[in-house]
């Protein structure tokens, strides 16, 4: 995208010899990430500018030399503070990979996670970018080593065990039941009224319970879940035109709009990088 003579650039890819990690390098100027979640961790090293993102009920500011850190399934947004935008490199390691690293290199017990969402550590930012550069060079040994170094460093300096969700409460059980229905009916979801009636509650009670459990209202969670499933289908080789109706979007342009506002790149570019990575 070009605005005012300045081009936004982004690449979202995987390196086959670094399994369990998605990678992103971007310069965003006018990008506005909508509220969404990831099933993975987000480790974003800011090199230029300031990224602003809503997290935990407040706006967070991540300047150059700091990291924006988001735990799995935590809702967040993202946009630039200033007109020049921001540049960053991002690692999206899976929960399983971070748990493996934590068990080997830290004393954290339980599911590991990050304590604060913005952490000033220029050296860790450089490590993130060195991971990306190593994958560019197809240096598997360096990429894997540097990834483990940066995750270990951040967990030791800004980590701990994530609190367990209270699944025993009535609200949490209600939200989990609603989520299961939406996952099963991703392409053909019921209305909020119908969903609430089927679960024996009122629409507003369901809305409150769902937002408390997942940080998003059901419709926003559904969009994020559709995009996550679209990512898996595109990575498996399906085309955007095939994926759109399969996950519940009305057409390819509908998919593209939501995909870019959550993943950061268009679905076609995402698919091409996955295909190139397996060649």
Image (tube, helix red, strand yellow):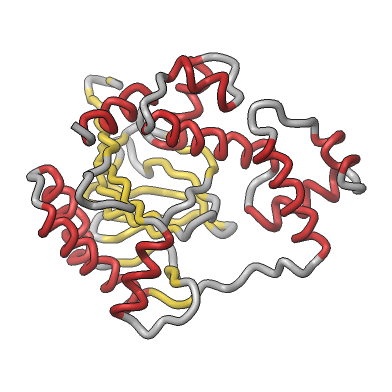
Residue 226, by quadrant, is: top right
Q: Residue at x 52, y 20 (%)?
A: 244
Q: Is residue 41 above or below residue 218?
A: below
| Residue closer to the observer: 174 or 29 | 174
| Residue closer to the observer: 256 or 123 | 256
Question: Would residue 270 be visible to someone looking at this image?
Answer: yes
The answer to whether 130 appears left or right of 100 in the picture is: left
Residue 222, by quadrant, is: top right
Q: Is residue 162 above or below residue 245?
A: below
Q: Residue at x 51, y 51 (%)?
A: 54
Question: Would residue 62 be visible to someone looking at this image?
Answer: no
Q: Is residue 87 above or below residue 18?
A: above
Q: Residue at x 68, y 38 (%)?
A: 184
Q: Is residue 265 above or below residue 175?
A: above
| Residue closer to the observer: 219 or 53 | 219
Q: How many marks?
A: 0
The answer to whether 257 appears left or right of 90 in the picture is: right
- The quadrant of the picture occupied by the N terminus is top left
- The quadrant of the picture occupied by the C terminus is top left
Q: Where is residue 125 shown, x and y percent of the image?
A: 22, 59
Q: Where is residue 6 shown, x and y percent of the image?
A: 23, 25
Q: Residue at x 34, y 66 (%)?
A: 119
The answer to whether 6 appears left or right of 268 in the picture is: left
Q: Where is residue 37 shown, x and y percent of the image?
A: 52, 47
The answer to whether 44 appears left or right of 171 in the picture is: left
């Amino acid at each position: 995208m070009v605005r005012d003579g300045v081009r936004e650039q982004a690449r979202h890819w995987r390196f086959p010899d670094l399994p369990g990690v998605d990678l992103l390098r971007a310069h965003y100027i006018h990008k506005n990430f909508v509220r969404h979640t990831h099933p993975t961790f987000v480790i974003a090293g800011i090199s230029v500018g300031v990224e602003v993102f809503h997290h935990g009920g407040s706006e967070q500011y991540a300047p150059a030399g700091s990291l924006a850190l988001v735990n799995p399934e935590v809702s967040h947004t993202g946009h630039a503070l200033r007109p020049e935008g921001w540049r960053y490199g991002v690692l999206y390691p899976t929960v399983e990979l971070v748990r493996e690293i934590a068990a080997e290199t830290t004393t954290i017990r339980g599911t590991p996670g990050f304590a604060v969402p913005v952490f000033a550590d220029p050296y860790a930012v450089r490590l993130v970018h060195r991971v990306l550069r190593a994958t560019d060079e197809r240096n598997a040994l360096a990429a894997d080593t540097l990834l483990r170094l940066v995750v270990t460093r951040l967990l030791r300096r800004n980590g701990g065990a994530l609190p367990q969700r209270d699944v025993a409460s009535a609200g949490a059980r209600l939200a989990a039941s609603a989520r299961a229905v939406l996952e099963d009916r991703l392409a053909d979801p019921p209305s909020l009224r119908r969903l609430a009636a089927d679960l024996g509650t009122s629409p507003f009670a369901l809305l409150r319970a769902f937002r408390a459990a997942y940080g998003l209202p059901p419709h926003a969670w559904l969009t994020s879940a559709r995009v996550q499933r679209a990512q898996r289908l595109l990575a498996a080789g399906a085309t955007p035109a095939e994926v759109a109706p399969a996950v519940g979007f009305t057409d390819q342009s509908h998919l593209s709009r939501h995909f870019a506002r959550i993943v950061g790149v268009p679905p076609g570019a995402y698919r091409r990088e996955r295909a190139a990575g397996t060649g």
